[in-house]
Amino acid sequence: MIVMRHGDLMTLSEYRLTPENDGVWDLIDGVLEKQPLATLVHQMVLGELLTRINEFTTATDPSLGLGIRNIGVAFSESFAPTPDIVYARREHFHLMRGSFMEGTPDLLVEVLSQDRDRDLVRKRDRYAAAGVPEYWIVDPDNEIILVLELSEGQYVDRTVRRTEALTTPTIPGFELSLERLFGHQFLAQLRENG
């Protein structure tokens, strides 16, 4: 991870004006952190998950919401991450402005990268403190999704395994077979190639 400091700590207002604001940076505690490059496995799993979410909402009820890839979330003047997927219900679309969501999304999704602590601990704690109702941590290596649901300010987690289906109260009726998500033939080939 590359960390960039521009003088003293950076504010969200300053971040919005920097050329580095290209969708692969997080502003954390006033410091710009470049996200690691996504692997092919990461990109395939992310693309498939986003496609399934949006196909479901479009076919079922477009007013349910929309999943968006690589949009920043402006939680505060010093914390503006760019999650892999931001899901917002229709009633929160007014919070989307330019390349940021100005407020708390209904669901955030991160696909684990080389810096596992970043998503499993640091972002988990921050998202809970920011009041994000649901946070998924997708682990392609172990073929699981850790679903975190906010309860009394803390996340309660459940693990969904490859043999199970992912469901969520945030998107009523949505169900995704993790076998379908992780079982793609091309993913197996990518894992073999390293």
Image (tube, grey):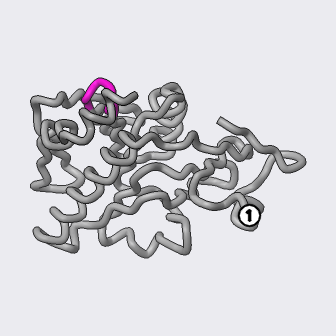
Image quadrant assignment for residue 153: top left
Q: Quadrant of the N terminus?
A: top right
Q: What residue lies at 27% left-to-right and 34% top-to-bottom?
A: 189
Q: What residue lies at 69% left-to-right and 65% top-to-bottom?
A: 16
Q: Secondary structure at mark 1?
A: loop
51 to the left or right of 29:
left
Q: Is residue 9 above or below residue 121?
A: below
Q: What residue lies at 36% left-to-right and 42% top-to-bottom?
A: 135
The residue tagged 1 is 19
125 to the left or right of 134:
right
Q: Quadrant of the C terminus?
A: top left
Name the main secondary structure of what is drawn in magenta.
Answer: loop
Image quadrant assignment for residue 147: top left
- Residue 155: in magenta span: no
- The range drawn in magenta is 139-144
Image quadrant assignment for residue 122: top right
In the rendering, at what x and y percent does residue 101 appear?
A: 50, 64
Nearer to the camera, 54 or 44: 44
In the rendering, at what x and y percent does residue 48 appear?
A: 26, 52
In the rendering, at what x and y percent does residue 73 appear?
A: 53, 57
Q: Is residue 44 above or below residue 23?
A: above
Nearer to the camera, 126 or 185: 185
In the rendering, at what x and y percent does residue 68 appear?
A: 39, 62
Which kind of residue does numbered mark 1 sit on? Pro
Nearer to the camera, 16 or 106: 16
